[in-house]
């Protein structure tokens, strides 16, 4: 598991621009979990995941991966991180070379690298015939898949994604989330940063809500969605299904409001009106 203990982080400390982005944060992500992180712009989400991935040095608090400090290389290697708009970071001449870059750096032999590239491409739904194309000959959605395949080829045990569906069209977005869910089912622990309460409702087992660098909520999404005050403070909206069931509840129907999906809402409404 990943454990964050009493983490405080300040950008540009001891300058006039000093900004404390995280204030005494503690939480854990269990192995195999689908864990979401939500919160308004500037709440500290990206700072937090970069620290968890070992990309930002910090002085106050601790981050441990399976009991080992993130400052150790072996701990960092268990974590893969996909930034927002990862396709901007492609730089090799071909799709294959781009995906192979990380595994090569790990010192794997050519046969193993090829195997990893093929596996990663299949995982993200990229046809192997695209291997020799330049990433710039691909569509935006395909480029993003290449970028993510490059991370998956490292076989991270924990995969962190920062708003991975931002800017994708609805269909690509849906496929994409289905693939992330597939990865999760195959045993990869997922940490998903998102503003989408719908995605959290459909996918996440646990959610952490940040506001101004502090934890406002940690727990099951269906519990979060009953806490209107927390959602308001965090600037988050309810999923449509939850909004609907709450309207029924306010209208006097005896319904359970801990609802996530349209299917759940439908069942609950039928039950109440029968
Ligand atoms: N490199 C930096 N230097 C100085 N301050 C920074 C830096 N990066 C982030 N910050 C500040 O730290 C705070 C947290 O930023 P962070 O990027 O972690 O927020 P976020 O929750 O990811 O926001 P968003 O939803 O917009 O991506 C913000 O106040 C931001 O201005
Ligand atoms: Mg961010």
Image (tube, helix red, strand yellow):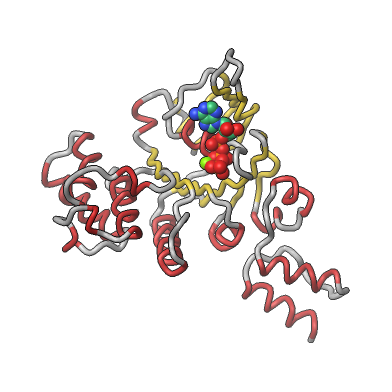
Residue 166 in the image: above or below residue 31: below
* Picture residue at 52% right of the left edge, 47% below the top: 193
* Picture residue at 32% right of the left edge, 56% below the top: 145
x, y percentage for residue 246? 78, 67
Q: Quadrant of the C terminus?
A: bottom right
x, y percentage for residue 51? 48, 30
x, y percentage for residue 49? 49, 37
Q: Residue furthest front?
A: 16
Q: Is residue 15 left or right of residue 129?
A: right
Q: Is residue 156 left or right of residue 94?
A: right
Which corner quadrant of the figure contains ligand 1? top right
Quarter holding residue 60: top right
* Picture residue at 21% right of the left edge, 51% below the top: 117
Residue 247 in the image: above or below residue 144: below
x, y percentage for residue 37? 57, 46
Q: Is residue 196 left or right of residue 139?
A: right
Quarter holding residue 103: top left
Regarding residue 45, the answer to whether it shows in the image is: no
Residue 61 in the image: above or below residue 103: above
* Picture residue at 69% right of the left edge, 49% below the top: 235
| Camera-side residue of 2 and 248 | 248
């Amino acid at each position: 598991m990943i454990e964050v203990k009493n983490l405080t982080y300040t950008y540009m400390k001891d300058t006039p621009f000093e900004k404390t982005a995280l204030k005494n944060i503690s939480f854990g992500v269990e192995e195999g979990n689908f864990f979401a992180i939500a919160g308004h712009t500037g709440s500290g989400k990206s700072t937090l995941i970069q620290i968890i991935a070992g990309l930002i040095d910090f002085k106050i608090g601790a981050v441990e991966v399976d009991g080992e400090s993130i400052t150790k290389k072996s701990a960092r290697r268990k974590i893969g991180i996909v930034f927002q708009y990862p396709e901007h970071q492609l730089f090799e001449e071909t799709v294959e070379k781009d995906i192979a870059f990380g595994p090569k750096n790990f010192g794997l032999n050519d046969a193993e690298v090829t195997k990893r590239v093929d596996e990663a491409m299949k995982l993200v739904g990229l046809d192997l015939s695209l291997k020799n194309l330049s990433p710039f000959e691909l569509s935006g959605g395909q480029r993003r898949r290449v970028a993510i395949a490059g991370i998956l080829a490292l076989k991270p045990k924990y995969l962190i994604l920062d708003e991975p569906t931002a800017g994708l069209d609805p269909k690509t977005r849906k496929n994409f989330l289905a693939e992330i869910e597939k990865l999760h089912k195959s045993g990869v622990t997922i940490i998903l940063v998102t503003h989408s309460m719908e995605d959290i409702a459909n996918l996440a087992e646990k959610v952490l809500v940040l506001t101004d660098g502090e934890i406002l909520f940690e727990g099951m999404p269906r519990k979060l969605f009953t806490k209107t005050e927390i959602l308001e403070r965090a600037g988050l909206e309810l999923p449509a299904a939850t909004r609907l069931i709450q309207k029924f509840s306010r209208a006097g129907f005896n319904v359970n409001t801990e609802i996530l999906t349209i299917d759940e809402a439908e069942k609950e409404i039928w039950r109440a009106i029968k």
